[in-house]
Amino acid sequence: MALSGWTVLLLALGVVPLVALDDARVLPAWLALVAVLVVLDLVLAASPRTVRLVRELPGPVRLGESTTARVRLVHEGRRRLRAVVRDAWEPSAGATGTRRRVTVRPGGGVALTTALTPFRRGVRRADAVTVRAWGPLRLAARQATHELPGTVTVLPRFSSRRHLPSRLARLRELDGRTSVQVRGRGTEFDSLREYVRGDDVRSLDWRATARRGDLVVRTWRPERDRRVVVVVDSGRTSAARVGDEPRLDTAFEASLLLAALASRAGDHVDLVVTDSRVRGRVQGVGAAGLLGALVETMAPIDPELVETDWSLVPGLVRRATTQRSLVVLATPVGSPGSVRGLLAALPQLTRRHLVVVAAVTDPGLDEAALERGDASAVHRAAAAERERLDAARVAAAVRQLGADVVTGSPEALPPALADHYLALKAAGRL
């Protein structure tokens, strides 16, 4: 049962006859009158349990986009339903318009629409629908909660998609589909052309030079059908937020852009998300369905507050491919103590594969390192500088073990990783 503000106001009005008549018997009589009216209102109110509810949910939605969920209410009682209906969603679903006042005749129905603008990736859940049915006097209401669970899958934002057209244009240049002055050096022979200043002298074709009497160089095109294995770290360090998103989300953004670019280049892309166990895997999916499979796998994965077991990674890569491949490890590069497992696993990977470590950096560290306003700012600057030095030491150790390192802010890391992939293609390393 619920009481309205009108009931409180009616009780307060009892002060008037009490003061006017100056009789103590007025107060019990007034309270009894109000109680009778409340009971009468409850009796005349429609039962909130005589409604039938059906939830209609939208399909997957990208993070930051809006969608609508609908609850259809059918009143199966014999009295007119005057109710407030509340559709309960978890806060991260960004639900608006969850409370609606409805009036439904017996046997009638109404559709209640809730706008959703999720601000967190993953599975956003609805819990229950509460119906509060008011009596005709609006003094009291009968209330019932109907369990009506539902979920909406929120896919990664993939805002780095805007960088894809420019990278595809560069890929076409490397592949020889558009005219350029100097082609990248790959491993598949393409054609011969005259030497121009700036060409790599290692590309000179001496037999063709002898036949023509002029310097002739071989041109190359990037190889196709290579393997790219992306390993995303979902351990505790990926839960730290940089800006408005966790490091894991930045790793997903970089992985999606790289996968879109590599699949257009004719390479095969596999994904593994792991911490102490494998959280998600995409393997053997063609270019047409690759991005869809990736975002569906990434969507429900949240960081786990456990240490990542890097000893599992070499075996996961072996199960994905047996040939020399590009292995991208999307993981934070922090203090030396937190990356011991990564450094121990790198030699097994670099022995057979081309390895790139992609790590997001916090631009706030650069700003904090320059602050000198007061004692607290100086301490923060010292801590920020120490963290930057630790990251530099780890990056140097990773390079010493034979892997490349790509770093950047959440906005800069995805295009930086895509550019590094193109540079590897142009240099014939992939």
Image (spheres, rainbow, N blue to C red):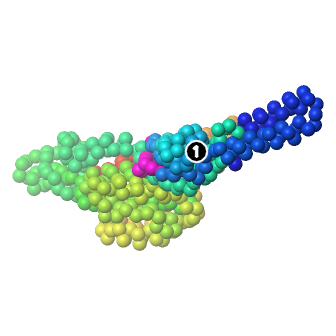
| Front position in the image: 242 or 49 | 49
The residue furthest top is 20
| Front position in the image: 82 or 216 | 82
Going 37% across and 71% down the picture, which residue do you hit? 318
Q: Which part of the image, by quadrant, shows the C terminus? A: bottom left
Q: Position of residue 305 (x, y in %)?
A: 58, 62
Examine the residues drawn in magenta and state their main secondary structure: loop
**Left or right: residue 39 compared with residue 61:** right
> What segment carries the magenta color?
55-65
**Left or right: residue 313 compared with residue 369:** left
Is 61 inside the magenta-drawn segment? yes
Task: Look at mark 1 in the image and give the residue it sits on.
Answer: 79
**Left or right: residue 10 compared with residue 344:** right
Going 46% across and 67% down the picture, which residue do you hit? 278
Is residue 343 something that shows in the picture? no
Is residue 316 something that shows in the picture? yes
Neighbourhood count class around disc 1 (C-alpha, 10 Å): few under 14, some 14–19, many 20 upward: some
